[in-house]
Amino acid sequence: MSENTSQLSPSSTVEAGPVSGEHPSSRQRRPARIFFPCVAISLVVSLMSAGGAVCLYDRYFAQKVVAVDLQGFLKRQKDDYLDGRISGEDLQRRMDELEAFVDQIPANRSVILSDVVVRNVRVLKP
């Protein structure tokens, strides 16, 4: 059985030639034609997903500092009440609006009084 099998020498091997109508160098260029568009698509998708993740994190999760002008609001209410421009019921309604305004500030915002702010902090006026 082993006598019938002939051993092929390296010089007797048959090499596959180009398929009919195919240029031999086109087989070498084909992977390069596929590689660069794949890299470009991967790069675009990666950049878009990273940018989207950073935007979502900044909008919904990152802690931000805001200031509330509570002193100014209370001073205006006091002046209006003492001058008779608003009644006691109006004053109570405005205080309830102030409480609702402070309660609606999102949880990812740290609130401080505007009296201690020097700069670079957004001041919210109720």
Image (cartoon, rainbow, N blue to C red):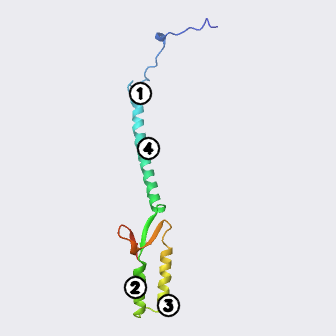
Residue under circle 2? 76
Residue pointed to by mark 1: 27
Residue lying at 59% horizontally and 8% vertically, measured from the top left: 5
Indicate the position of residue 30 as horizontal and vertical percent values. Answer: 41, 31
Q: Earlier in the sequence, mark 3 or mark 2?
A: 2
Q: Are marks 4 and 2 in contact (CB under 8 Å)?
A: no
Single out the residue that lies furthest toward the right: 1
Toward the bottom, the furthest residue is 84
Amino acid at dot 2: Arg
Using the numbered discs, state the Cα–Cα distance from disc 4 to disc 2 in whole angstroms.
58 Å
Cα gap from disc 4 to disc 1, whole angstroms: 24 Å
Give the number of the mark in front: 3 or 2.
2
- Which label is found at residue 42? 4
Name the amino acid, label 3.
Answer: Glu
What residue do we see at 48% from left, 71% from top? 105
Kindly identify the residue that appears in the image at 39 percent across and 72 percent down: 116
> Which callout, 3 or 1, points at the residue further toward the start of the chain?
1
Q: Nearer the viewer, residue 101 or 19?
A: 101
Which element carries disc 2, helix, strand or loop?
helix
Give the foreground label among 3 and 4. 3
Task: Identify the mark nearer the N-term, 3 or 4.
Answer: 4
- Looking at the image, is mark 4 or mark 2 earlier in the sequence? 4
The CA distance from mark 3 to mark 4 is 63 Å
Q: Secondary structure at mark 4?
A: helix
Nearer to us in this view, 41 or 52:
52
Q: Check the image and report above or below for 68 versus 49.
A: below
Residue receiving disc 3: 89
State the image coordinates of residue 117 (x, y, percent, origin top left).
38, 71
Q: Is residue 94 visible?
A: yes
The crowding category of the residue bearing disc 4, from other C-alpha atoms within 10 Å (few below 14, some 14 to 19, many at least 20), is few
